[in-house]
Image: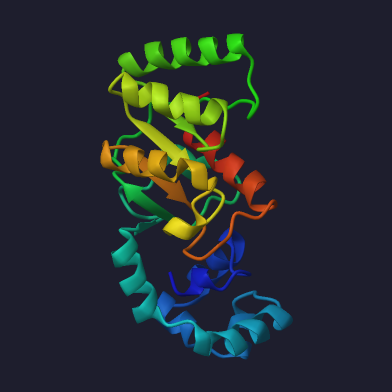
Amino acid sequence: VALAHFPKFGPKRLQKIKKYFSSFKEAFGSSVRQLMEAGIEENISQEFTAARPDINPDEIREKMEKEKIEVIAIDDELYPPLLKEIYSPPQLIFFKGCLRERDEFNLAVVGSRKYTTYGKMAALEIVDGLSRNNLIIVSGLALGIDALAHEACLKAGGRTIAVLGSGLDKQNIYPSHNRYLAEKIADSGGAVISEFPMDVAPIAHNFPRRNRIISGLSLG
């Protein structure tokens, strides 16, 4: 988790680090030379060792506990099996709520932020039927159809997973208008998840990465 708080250690570099070092703890304290031997570029290795004094694992853990954020790694039993099949799967998933070992019957429902009357009616009707037949609804918590899909699933007593393009700490849940919906999803037995650690803002280039997770979690 501490390594993931260095923004340039994404899924590919964390995978290289995992292969080379005997433990992530060893990697966290490693030298520029060792990181380069693991396949990390020299400039990135130097940037990390310069940034490392500002990354405090104990403080991160305390803040995660306060925010009720949990984390699983790619080899954890709870890691969604479908997600392992995508290109460059996240090495870590941060989540609030509940992940289940056999979360497999997932369908993604996404759509426009500005929807038509027909679009709203269709989304609500389709999601209601899917949810009542025990399919898990995956979406992105965005304004519009995404939020409607989550809400329709909850109303039908179903299980829904929201995937974010930011950290899961309260100030970065995006859009802020849907923070209450995020809490409702987590409290209802669903999950709000992200590959981004705390304090990562919802910046534009995070969302294509978020979308590959929505797709990767889902059968269709």
Residue 127 or residue 214, whichever sits in front: 127
Q: Is residue 16 above or below residue 171?
A: below
**Residue at 48%, 69% in the rendered image:** 18
Q: Is residue 182 above or below residue 201?
A: above
Q: Is residue 182 above or below residue 21?
A: above
Q: Quadrant of the N terminus?
A: bottom left
Image x and y of residue 152, in percent? 40, 21
**Left or right: 188, with 4 as reference point:** left
**Residue at 43%, 57% in the rendered image:** 170
Quadrant of residue 13 within the rendered picture: bottom right
Quadrant of residue 102 within the rendered picture: top left
**Residue at 48%, 82% in the rendered image:** 55
**Would residue 201 be visible to someone looking at this image?**
yes
Image x and y of residue 86, in percent? 56, 42
**Would residue 107 be visible to someone looking at this image?**
no
Image x and y of residue 145, in percent? 55, 25
Tell me the colour scheme of the image.
rainbow
**Residue at 32%, 29% in the rendered image:** 159
